[in-house]
Image: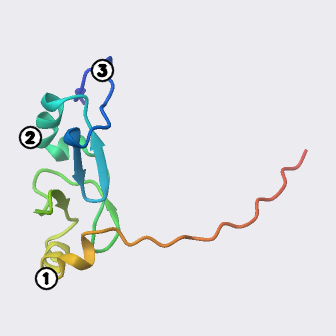
Amino acid sequence: MPSLFDTATNASLDAGHRVFVNYESFFFAGDAERRRFLDEPTRWCGWLTDPVTMARFLPDRNAPTTERDGRIFYFASDSTEAAFAAHPDSFAAPHTTMIAMRSPTPMAR
């Protein structure tokens, strides 16, 4: 896969160089890199979380998509896109739950 950016240039943590795709944030070194990403987000984004089912999937350029509040959303199927469209406020922000960790087991020596 070709590189999206010049690896000698660091990304900028400037909100103007950020793109939200589903629940992921992508930061870019500059406007040119950001525009290149936005031309083909599925080429660069990798695995995403479907906002309805919370299942991980790898979108392609034909994946159902919509935009809401400046955020791009891709869906694993047409049915999850339809569920999102019916109740977007229910899915636009991630719903996360903390999972309790077990106490670590001491390592044997």
Percent x, y for residue 55? 35, 67
Q: Amino acid at mark 2?
A: Asp
- Density class for disc 3 (Cα within 10 Å; few <14, some 14-19, many ≥20) is few
Q: Are marks 3 and 1 in contact (CB under 8 Å)?
A: no
Using the image, tell me which numbered label, if any, was put on residue 86: 1
Q: Amino acid at mark 3?
A: Thr
- Name the residue at 35% across, 69% down: 54
Q: Nearer the viewer, mark 3 or mark 2?
A: 3
Q: CA distance from mark 3 to mark 2?
A: 20 Å
Which image quarter: residue 29? top left
Asked if residue 83 is positioned above or below residue 68 in the image, the reply reads below
Q: Secondary structure at mark 1?
A: helix
Using the image, tell me which numbered label, if any, was put on residue 105: none
Which image quarter: residue 17? top left
Which of the two labelled residues, at mark 3 and mark 2, occupies the earlier sequence position?
3
Q: CA distance from mark 3 to mark 1?
A: 42 Å
Query: What residue does disc 2 label?
Result: 39
In this view of the protein, which residue sits in the foreground, 71 or 99?
A: 71
Query: What residue does disc 3 label?
Result: 9
Percent x, y for residue 8? 32, 17
In this view of the protein, which residue sits in the foreground, 69 or 60?
A: 69
Q: Amino acid at mark 1?
A: Ala
Percent x, y for residue 43? 19, 41
**Quadrant containing the C terminus in the rendered view:** top right
Which of the two labelled residues, at mark 3 and mark 1, occupies the earlier sequence position?
3
Q: Nearer the viewer, mark 3 or mark 1?
A: 3
Percent x, y for residue 101? 66, 66
